[in-house]
Image (tube, rainbow, N blue to C red):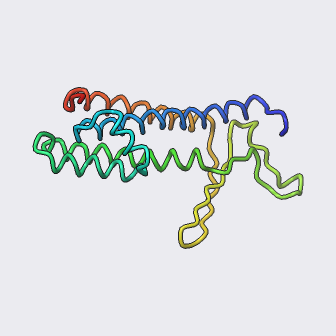
Amino acid sequence: MHNLNHTQLKHHAAIGGVALNWTHLENFLQSVLWRIAGMDQRVGRCITQHMPFRSLCDAIITIANETDRFKHLAPELKMLMSQCDALRIKRNDTVHALWAMFIGSSDAEAQVLNAGVGEVTGMLIKARGSLNIKINRTTVSAIDDISEEIIDFSNRLGDFVEKYIPNV
């Protein structure tokens, strides 16, 4: 591997920030499910550790709807889970992109090094039924903003849960 320049190191750190903050949010959402389902942490983790993220969110909404104690919170939880799903897409597009510091062919003029202008470029590759490749030109600052969105959402969710959903 080649030596990384300052912009590349900042880019890698920004992606890591998104991944780390998402991990904290996902773990917190697991604890929300344990709370509304009345599970202790150890048993709850045995179940939620194997759940895909969207299934986790669906389970939170469903259990709230089916539990007299939390039924009145179901509409708010549904809205929060919808906001969380939008963040999930941003997180996935950031963490799973095929990132590069330039786009172009072997022609030196076609290779546009965008690190000098603070940009980074990623290929978002999806293959569900057909191959879909999208080029994402962004900045390290914009990736940092996604991390901040995750933190802000986590704080709002934490405030809501602390106020309305007690620990088991």
From what the image shows, is residue 122 above or below residue 41? below
Question: In the depicted view, which residue is nearer to us: 51 or 101?
Answer: 51
Residue at 60% x, 34% y: name it.
Answer: 16
Residue 5 to residue 71: above or below: above
> Residue 118 occupies which quadrant of the picture?
top right
Residue at left offset 64%, top offset 31%: 13
Q: Quadrant of residue 126?
A: bottom right
Residue 36: image x %, image y %?
23, 39
- Please state if 84 lies on the left or on the right of 120 as rendered: left
Q: Quadrant of the N terminus?
A: top right
Number of marks in the rendered image: 0
Q: Is residue 59 left or right of residue 13?
A: left
**Which quadrant is home to the C terminus?**
top left
Name which residue lies at 53% across and 33% down. Answer: 20
Residue 107 placement (x, y as % from top left)? 89, 57
Residue at (24, 28) in percent of width and height: 167
